[in-house]
């Protein structure tokens, strides 16, 4: 196909990163179930270790099946390079790793997946890193939180659990002005609904566990680099702009230009932190991603229908779905996620905590699980599970108060989803 013809999303989700196997002609990407790769000779080995030649050395760093997935997600996100990791949480640490050092901080949205709040507020302290959480709807607060030790700004495009939409261009303008990369977790939106890089993000992270795989089979993550950030513009990112002692003094920024971040993530990050995706896991995600756009259209259509039904039901206090005209985030859809506001939202049940627990226990079609982005409709009471480790104030800020449940609307028949909610609400609020 002609080089200058730009392929559409539906084509890329099937073909990007995937050529017939050169050895066998296999049309589907083989699962390269191997730990290591035979060097042609000693010069070839030395070239690979010197990054003078690109190729596989050892599967902790790269593997052809995993690389095909990384390349596919990179194309879908409009980046220049990417890596896959063992989970979404691993991807978040990997995204921060080339940027941070002891004493550095990340300015993060208070509306994040509960596990991310815990990772950033508690666990990263062990590395000497810290996080400052602010309301990302308050742009002055975001700007004010950035200090001389800030090395990244972090948010979700469509935030879990409430489905709130972040004004990515406004946040990107602040991080650009400060000379700091913006990292957007695009898990709940997927590149089909939202393109953070086109909206100004530097890096995109994913839990591929969710919609990208789409069938609830494997955990995985990805970090995609836009290639647009100038790591040499200030002294804040020495791993990329100065000789890297962890890679025999190579200056990644000088040697690799726009691919500096990706190569650092492989040659130092994956090599030393080992948060590697396995090829079998990559295979499941490659299978799932082929139908991403079809699933997302149906997820969005179902979510809209279910959210509208819930909003009009007397047993419900409020519904947070941004696709409802009543949502304060409704106006952001056109700019941030023009194909729809996703399929993840919360609703508050009259009767509070007890009614929420009864509702969850009474559903038959919904699965009560700590996951989202499956073909199946899923529900969880965030305050007693995913957001349990948070303080009541953090729960409230994250949109996970005790009186709300979070749903991830699947691609079953919308009428069946509604019927299940109806019968369970009757029991929960009797
Ligand atoms: C928005 C978001 N980001 C990151 C993660 C972490 O991903 P994983 O469970 O694959 O580590 C999750 C998990 O639920 C999530 O919802």
Image (tube, grey):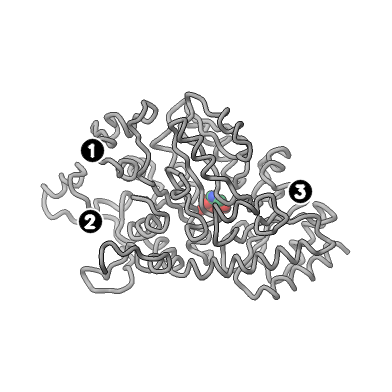
The reply to whether the C-beta atoms of the residues labelled 2 and 3 are less than 8 Å apart is: no
Judge the density around disc 2: few (<14), some (14-19), many (≥20) Cα neighbours within 10 Å: few
Q: Residue at x 80, y 56 (%)?
A: 349
Q: Residue at x 73, y 67 (%)?
A: 363
Mark 2 and mark 1: Cα distance apart in space = 25 Å
The reply to whether the C-beta atoms of the residues labelled 3 and 1 are less than 8 Å apart is: no
Which one is closest to the eye, mark 2 or mark 3?
3
Which one is closest to the eye, mark 3 or mark 1?
1
Q: Is label 3 in a helix, a strand or a loop?
A: loop
The residue at which mark 3 appears reads as 402
Mark 3 and mark 1: Cα distance apart in space = 52 Å
Q: Nearer the viewer, residue 136 or 386?
A: 136
Q: Residue at x 28, y 30 (%)?
A: 245
Mark on residue 356?
A: none
Q: Residue at x 33, y 45 (%)?
A: 262
Q: Is label 2 in a helix, a strand or a loop?
A: loop
The residue at which mark 2 appears reads as 37
Residue 19, percent from left and from top: 28, 67
The residue at which mark 1 appears reads as 255
Q: Nearer the viewer, residue 332 or 113?
A: 332
Residue 317, percent from left and from top: 81, 55
Residue 238, percent from left and from top: 34, 29
């Amino acid at each position: 196909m002609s080089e200058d013809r730009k392929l559409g999303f539906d084509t890329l989700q099937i073909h990007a990163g995937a050529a017939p196997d050169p050895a066998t002609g296999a049309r589907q990407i083989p699962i390269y179930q191997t730990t290591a790769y035979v060097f042609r000779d000693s010069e070839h080995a030395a070239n690979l270790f010197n990054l003078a030649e690109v190729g596989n050395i050892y599967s902790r760093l790269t593997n052809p099946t995993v690389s095909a997935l990384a390349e596919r997600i990179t194309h879908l996100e409009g980046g220049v390079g990417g890596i896959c990791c063992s989970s979404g949480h691993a991807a978040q640490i990997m995204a921060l790793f080339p940027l941070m050092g002891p004493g550095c901080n990340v300015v993060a949205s208070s509306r994040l997946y509960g596990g991310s709040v815990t990772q950033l507020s508690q666990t990263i302290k062990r590395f000497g890193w810290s996080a400052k959480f602010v309301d990302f709807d308050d742009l002055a607060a975001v700007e004010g939180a950035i200090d001389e030790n800030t090395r990244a700004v972090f948010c979700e495009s469509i935030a879990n659990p409430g489905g709130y939409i972040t004004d990515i261009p406004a946040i990107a303008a602040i991080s650009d002005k400060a000379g700091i990369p913006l990292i957007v977790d695009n898990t709940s939106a997927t590149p089909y609904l939202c393109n953070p890089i086109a909206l100004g993000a530097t890096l995109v992270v994913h839990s591929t566990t969710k919609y990208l795989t789409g069938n609830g089979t494997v955990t995985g993550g990805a970090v995609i680099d836009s290639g647009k950030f100038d790591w040499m513009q200030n002294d804040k990112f020495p791993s990329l702009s100065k000789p890297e002692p962890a890679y025999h003094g190579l200056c990644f920024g000088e040697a690799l230009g726009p691919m500096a971040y990706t190569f650092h993530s492989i040659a130092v990050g994956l090599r030393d932190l080992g948060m590697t995706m396995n090829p079998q896991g990559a295979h499941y995600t490659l299978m799932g991603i082929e139908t991403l756009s079809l699933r997302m259209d149906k997820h969005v259509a179902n979510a809209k229908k279910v959210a509208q039904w819930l909003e009009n039901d007397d047993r419900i206090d409020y519904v947070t779905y941004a696709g409802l005209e009543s949502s304060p985030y409704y106006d952001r859809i056109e700019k941030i996620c023009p194909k729809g506001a996703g399929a993840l939202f919360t609703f508050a049940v009259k009767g509070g905590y007890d009614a929420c627990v009864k509702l969850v226990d009474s559903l038959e079609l919904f699965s009560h699980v700590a996951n989202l982005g499956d073909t199946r409709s899923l529900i969880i009471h965030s305050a007693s599970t995913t957001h349990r480790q948070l303080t009541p104030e953090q729960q409230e800020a994250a949109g996970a108060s005790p009186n709300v449940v979070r749903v991830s609307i699947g691609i079953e028949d919308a009428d069946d989803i509604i019927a299940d909610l109806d019968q369970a609400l009757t029991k929960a609020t009797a």
